[in-house]
Image: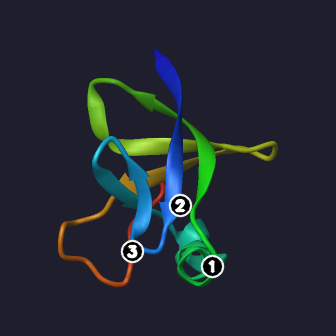
């Protein structure tokens, strides 16, 4: 079962429960650069409690998956599921 929550888009990735997440959409739309230049913002997500490596963005178009970033990865990169 998926649980609802919020993530925070920052210059260093999408923060959720002490982890940073990313995906090609966030990179393509330059979310991290926008957060660095302006300010961070919240996004609605859903997640599986037992799986901490993936979160899903809830948007009107679809549910978008975000993978957890590796600790030393810069710039943000990752895969969607």
SS at badge 1: helix
Mark 3 or mark 2: which is in front? 2
Q: Is residue 51 left or right of residue 25?
A: left
Task: Pick whichever, 48 or 6, lies toward us.
Answer: 6
SS at badge 3: loop
Residue at the far right: name it: 60
C-alpha separation, residue under disc 3 versus residue under disc 2: 14 Å
Q: Position of residue 65 (x, y in %)?
A: 51, 49
- As drawn, the label of residue 75 is none
Q: Earlier in the sequence, mark 2 or mark 1?
A: 2
Residue with the mark numbered 1: 34
> Which residue is painted at 33% across and 24% down in the image?
49
| Position of 25 relative to 28 (above/below) | above
C-alpha separation, residue under disc 2 versus residue under disc 1: 9 Å
Q: Earlier in the sequence, mark 1 or mark 3?
A: 1
Q: Are marks 2 and 1 in contact (CB under 8 Å)?
A: yes
Q: Label 3: few (<14), some or many (≥20) within 10 Å?
A: some
Residue with the mark numbered 3: 77
C-alpha separation, residue under disc 1 versus residue under disc 3: 16 Å
Residue with the mark numbered 2: 9
């Amino acid at each position: 079962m998926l649980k609802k929550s919020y993530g925070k888009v920052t210059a260093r990735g999408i923060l959720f429960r002490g982890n940073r997440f990313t995906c090609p959409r966030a990179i393509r739309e330059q979310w991290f650069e926008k957060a660095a230049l302006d300010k961070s913002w919240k996004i609605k997500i859903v997640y599986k409690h037992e799986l901490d490596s993936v979160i899903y963005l809830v948007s009107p178009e679809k549910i978008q998956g975000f993978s957890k970033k590796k600790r030393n990865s810069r710039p943000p990169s990752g895969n969607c599921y």
